[in-house]
Amino acid sequence: MEELVDRCLCIPFVRSKQSRMASPGSHALYLSDEIAAGPPGAFIDGHEFCHLHPLPEGSIHLTLPAVLRQEVMRLSWGEPHPIAAAGILTTLMTVYAPRDGQEMDTVFGLVEQSCQFAQGKLRLLYGAERSLHKAP
């Protein structure tokens, strides 16, 4: 999990702190005020767009636009967060912990997409969904 956190902290403009919305030891990823230009639904708390739970849980909670949420569910990479299922912050997803390097790459790509969503820059390119593969 630390490898994923380290990779996420290499995304331009991303900072980390303890999440107010997650268990102790979780890493909240957030953007500064100047960079956080996404819609309100792109943020969990303040300008936090994602948090990574420590092992043994290792799940990732992040915000995504509707088309990506549907793709994550279709390919079995995650599910709506329970508060999203209750109609609160419907953009919030639970993404399953990666088990190997290939899954790490896919999950990292989802964190990058969440970051783009939080910056108001998410551009869905034709065929972008193909970068995800069905989870085993």
Image (tube, helix red, strand yellow):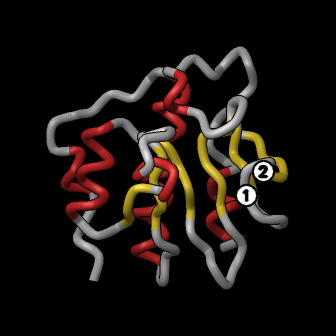
> x and y percent of residue 81 in the render?
47, 56
Q: Which mark is residue 118?
A: none
What residue is disc 1 on? Answer: 22
Label 2 to label 1: alpha-carbon separation: 5 Å
Secondary structure at badge 2 equals loop
Find residue 76 and report its image quarter: bottom left
> x and y percent of residue 102 in the render?
40, 74
Q: In the displayed structure, does residue 78 sit left or right of residue 92?
A: left
| Mark 2 residue crowding within 10 angstroms, few (<14) / some (14–19) / many (20+) | many
Quadrant occupied by the N terminus? bottom right
Q: Identify the residue at image location x=56%, y=62%.
A: 60
What residue is disc 2 on? Answer: 19
Judge whether 81 appears above or below 2 on screen: above
Closer to us: 79 or 98 = 79
Judge whether 119 appears above or below 57 on screen: above
Secondary structure at badge 1 equals loop
> x and y percent of residue 54 in the render?
72, 73
> x and y percent of residue 106 in the render?
40, 63
Looking at the image, the residue that sits furthest to the front is 86
Q: In the displayed structure, does residue 124 sit left or right of residue 38?
A: left
Question: Is there a contact, CB below 8 Å, between mark 2 and mark 1?
Answer: yes
| Residue type beneath disc 2 | Ser
Q: Identify the residue at image location x=77%, y=64%.
A: 23
Closer to us: 1 or 93 = 93
Judge whether 64 appears above or below 117 on screen: below
| Residue type beneath disc 1 | Ala
Q: Identify the residue at image location x=25%, y=40%.
A: 67
